[in-house]
Amino acid sequence: MRETAGETVFRHQFLFKPEEEIVNSGARDFIDILRLVPGFEFGYDVEGVTSAGLRGIWGHEGKILLLVDGQEMNELTYATIQLGSHYNVNNIKRIEILRGPGSCVYGGFAELAVINIITRKSDDLNGLSASAQYGQMTHSYGRMNGSIEAGKMLKDADFSVSAFGSLAQRSAKPTTVWVETDPDNDGWEEYEYGADRTDLKKIAAGNVNAGLNYRNLSTRFIYDYYSVGTELVDYDAAAQEFTGDTMHGVTFNSLLGEVKYRFDLTGSGGYELEYRLRYNWGYASASYSYYNAGLFDKNTVETYAADGNDNALLGFPVHKVGANACFFIGSLSVNPSVAWLSERFVYDAEPESPVVLANLYLRYKDLFTRGLSAGIGVYNIFDQDYDFVQPYQGDYPYPGPGFEAAIKLTYDWKW
């Protein structure tokens, strides 16, 4: 983020964490991974749910978007995300993190950041993988995790499925809470429950992630379960004593899915170059543009393809050169412009030949009186045969405008 006078500008930062870094870090859960990312730290919310903040701002309630294989994992009541001992870190291929506002692209949950978890698919697994983990704290187990993943590439199809389960403790340390013992006199007392009460800090998590692709059709379904416990302290006001602790908690259940069909795609690669200059006498610019539809096999839509040229698409020139200038002579401005277009391909017909489209426009300001302007222009000076071509397999081209002369009067009245 940088600050200038009167405004604040957020700089987006994109971070990519590959599988190798995640495995080598020994991360136990997703919190361990995010702790390696600058700006992230963690806090807890009601019911003991652990979540993240970024750059000092608490992001739990709908300010950080979490995606798993493109599926939004924010629950829909308060848009929260639950991170402690939750997701299967053994099945992550890579994590993409956009630090900075992303709501204009990703929706309202992306105010602070977008986290995209991409799991291993059939081409990554191509078989079976299983893992188990046990962690021991000072007074109890820390976590017991297990996961299994399978995936296979077939002739016209592929599938991947993973299952993960976890039982964990938030902490083995004693916890101190404040309990209101005398509501009438605003009386509060500390109460500590010890490490032996591990049932008050239990986390249970599990999910199943399954995907199937057949040719251009793909499906993916995710079931996610997360339960976290917290403590309620009972106090007998009449006896003025604590009577014990009771288990309390919250459970999240999510079922997500999508079915997609991948249609043939079109695209192109290329570049545009432009040079501009401006002086007291006026301004000028020159440009060149180029595209290639065969670069990286970007076009797979037959109806757009140019017959006999895999690098071109119907209707549009591969090369275009342009120039424009304006010269000020007192109240008179002289504006010449020119565009050269390379050949354009037509469906089931000969290509359109290259053309040069040249225009000249003269404008005189404050003619006879202030605010009155007059202009005269000639267009397509060389009367080139320019046609509008349908950029797909369709009809023959339609003729475009030929040579034309025009005059224009404009009056601006200010009061």
Image: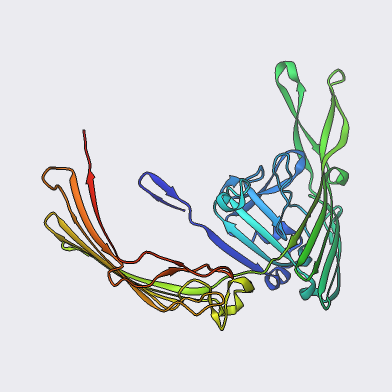
Regarding residue 297, the answer to whether it shows in the image is yes
In the picture, measured across the screen, residue 58 lies left or right of residue 398, that is right
Q: Position of residue 176 (x, y in %)?
A: 76, 38
Image quarter in which the C terminus is found: top left
Q: Could you say where residue 409 lies in the image, as x and y percent from the top left? A: 22, 48
- The quarter of the displayed image where residue 337 is located: bottom left
Q: 99 and 122: which one is in front?
A: 122
Looking at the image, residue 130 lies above or below residue 55: below
Q: x%, y% of residue 154?
A: 84, 77
Give the side of residue 15 with respect to residue 257, left or right: left
Query: Which residue ends up furthest to the top in the rendered image?
Result: 184
Q: At 71% from the left edge and 65% from the top edge, which residue is drawn?
A: 262
Which colour scheme appears in the figure?
rainbow
Which residue is at the front of the view, 171 or 340? 340
**Which residue occupies the extreme bottom position in the image?**
308
State the count of labels.
Answer: 0
Rendering quarter of residue 297: bottom right
Q: Is residue 36 left or right of residue 171?
A: left
Question: Can see residue 324?
Answer: no
Q: Position of residue 225 (x, y in %)?
A: 83, 50
Closer-to-camera residue (36/104):
104
Residue 321, placed above or below residue 415: below
